[in-house]
Amino acid sequence: MTNKNDFLTHVPPMGIYETLYQFLNSFGTYMGEKGTHPWSQGFPLTSQIPGGPEMPKSIPISSTDLKYPKAWGKPKLRQTIAEYYNHYYNSSLDYENIMIFAGGRPGLTALLMFLKPDIKVRIASTEYTPYYDMLRFFKRDYKLIDSTEENTFCPTTDEYFGKNSNQRKLLLLSNPCNPTGITRKGDELKELIEKAEASGNGVLFDEAYEFFHTPPISSLQFVNDINNSNIFVTGAATKGLQAPGIRIGWVVASKKYIEILGNFSSFGMGGVSQPSQLYALKLFDKTRIELARNTISRFYDEQREKYEKGFLELGLKLFSGDGGFYHWCKLPDSLTAEKLNEKLFKKGAAILKGSDCDMHRLGDNSHLKHFFRFSFGPLFPESYDNDIKILGEAINSKKG
């Protein structure tokens, strides 16, 4: 609670943390520890997947690597990321188009922090939960675009841009989408970018789940000249590179915007851990990343299909796309996600409530109260039968 005598403004946690706190209070241990079922968690397996590359076990550290890092990030890592996009998506980047952050969210936060106040952010009403917190605390002007069961959680390009041609706009979206897995690709993605560039508007693509689609996908394949564009892309080692703990992410943008972000880092961040950046360089080894792009997408496609079959047999309605590592599920009208979690907590499991992904933040009054996000990201294939058993028992049990 805020007290008028406090020096700091109260900041609530993002929605998933409320679920984690409730789980801890109910089950007595932290989600993700042995004996729990982390279906609410948005992280991938951090060990070698079948047929995939091994995770680097160590990196050499010299005394030079213990000095202050460069504000923009290590030039070699920045250039390596630029070359990665150039190779796979035929872009024309160099290291000055890349800025390193301590994860994907800090990059998103910095971009929204320095967004000019006359720009209206347009965002789907069902999206990645922290977007709401960022927009609200930076007091950004934003418009929610209907993303509901009626339009299968996929607003059109025209709906994203709206009719007011005099208003400068920044579209903000995760692609593939968290929580739905819906992926904009091909002509649809190309149209979105072309319309933004032609009108002088912008798009901020959160591409954390780039690898979790077949084939992997990036908007950069359709950006003609990043340096004369208001297109921003964020990426991270968190998901496809299977290393959330090293806290490495990046922003791709025009050189003039990267300079602004680097200037901010010089006084506001102080750069990013040099050892973490060295580990990220190992993750970008050309042979390793080729194998990762192929095996990650294939492994998670198989997981997605398997859980889809099981969920349909449980009587759930699915509105999931073909990307990410989530299923977007609807419960029978007699059961809310809140009530489902109360049952699951007792079994050491939890899901992310749909209401936490509702940018309207209506709580129990949310039209998404019967929806939930199920993450198969951190799950081994051998857990499937037990997962379906536990979830089925919770859905079908009459008592809370």
Image (cartoon, rainbow, N blue to C red):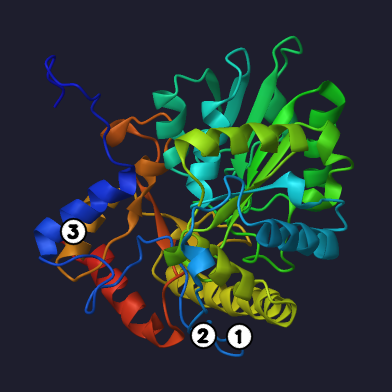
Tell me the crowding category of disc 3: few under 14, some 14 to 19, or many 20 or more residues within 10 angstroms, Cα based. Answer: many
Q: Mark 1 points at which residue?
A: 52
| Residue 216 shown left or right of residue 344 in the figure | right
Q: Residue at x 45, y 84 (%)?
A: 381
Which residue is painted at 52% across and 79% down in the image?
60
- Can you tell which mark lies on residue 48? 2
Q: Which of marks 3 and 2 is in front?
A: 2
How many marks are shown on the rendered structure? 3
Residue 146 visible from this viewpoint = no
Judge by depth and name the residue closer to the eye, 322 or 195.
Answer: 195
| Farthest residue, direction front | 63
Q: In this view, does 122 lie to the left or right of 11?
A: right
Amino acid type, residue under disc 1 in the picture: Gly
Please tell me which residue lies in front, 5 or 131.
Answer: 5
Three-letter amino acid code at the position of disc 3: Phe
Distance of mark 1 from mark 2, alpha carbons? 6 Å
Residue beneath disc 3: 23
Q: Position of residue 82 (x, y in %)?
A: 76, 57
Query: Which dot marks residue 229?
Result: none
Q: Do callouts 1 and 2 mark residues in contact (Cβ within 8 Å)?
A: yes
Q: What element carries label 2?
A: loop
Q: In this view, does 136 lie above or below 129?
A: above
Q: Label 2 is placed on what type of residue?
A: Gln
Image quadrant where one finds the C terminus? bottom left
* C-alpha distance separating marks 3 and 2: 28 Å
Whether residue 216 is visible to the viewer of this picture, yes or no, is yes
From the top left corner, tell me how far across and down residue 93 is, in percent.
82, 51
Q: What's the residue at 56%, 86% (across, down)?
A: 54
Residue placed most toward the observer, 105 or 293: 105
Mark 1: few, some, or many residues within 10 Å (few <14, many ≥20)? some
